[in-house]
Amino acid sequence: MEHGTKPIVIFEALTALGLILFWIGFFTVGLAPQTPPPGYFVYEHSFPLPDLILAAALLVAARLLYQGKAAGRTLSLVCAGALIFLGVLDFSFNLQNGLYAISTLDLVLNAFINLWCVVLGLWIAIRLRSSGTD
């Protein structure tokens, strides 16, 4: 494993697990707001496949980084871009549709998830870019 990549490996694996658990919870215990805005379910139902592909990619990237393989850096950078896109897209939808204003719990949960994705994506990109060879 390259020096300094252990935290990335851990956060990638935890994020993949979080994505998987979110969708299990969404479809089993119902994580939707009590009064969702129009289009909420159509929007949300477009995400399981790409999110699960991202989760798989994060797990593969974490494994490859752990093994010290260059492909781990490349795949981690791809995942970083996907995380940033996902976080900004969700932020935009949530803001435009008042999801942050439904309840304090919705605000905290949605804001945390959105910030986690964007900040983690940026952090991975910066860490791997600054430790790469030019």
Image (cartoon, rainbow, N blue to C red):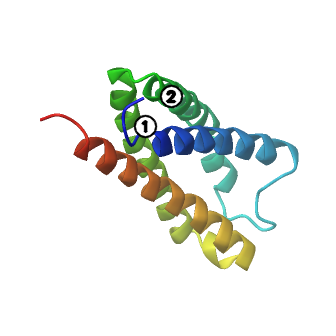
- Which residue sits at x=62%, y=64%? 110
Q: Which of marks 2 and 1 is nearer the N terminus?
A: 2
Residue type, numbered disc 1: Cys
Cβ–Cβ under 8 Å for marks 2 and 1: yes
- Which residue sits at x=76%, y=64%? 33
Q: In this view, does 49 lie to the left or right of 81?
A: right
Quick one: 60 or 66, which is closer to the camera? Answer: 66
- Which residue sits at x=35%, y=37%? 77
- Under circle 1, the secondary element is helix
The extreme right residue here reads: 29
* Pointer 2 local density, CA inside 10 Å: few below 14, some 14–19, many at least 20: many
Residue type, numbered disc 2: Ala
Which residue is label 2 attached to?
A: 57
Is 44 above or below relative to 96?
above
- Which residue sits at x=67%, y=45%? 18
Where's the N terminus, which quadrant?
A: top left
Q: In x, y percent, where is residue 21?
A: 74, 42
Q: In x, y percent, where is residue 111?
A: 58, 68
Is 69 above or below relative to 79?
above
Is 86 above or below relative to 99?
above
The extreme left residue here reads: 134
Q: In x, y percent, where is residue 8?
A: 46, 43
Is 76 above or below relative to 64?
below
Q: In x, y percent, where is residue 25?
A: 80, 46
Which residue is label 1 attached to?
A: 79
Q: In which quarter of the image is residue 97?
A: bottom right
Mark 2 and mark 1: span between their CA atoms? 7 Å
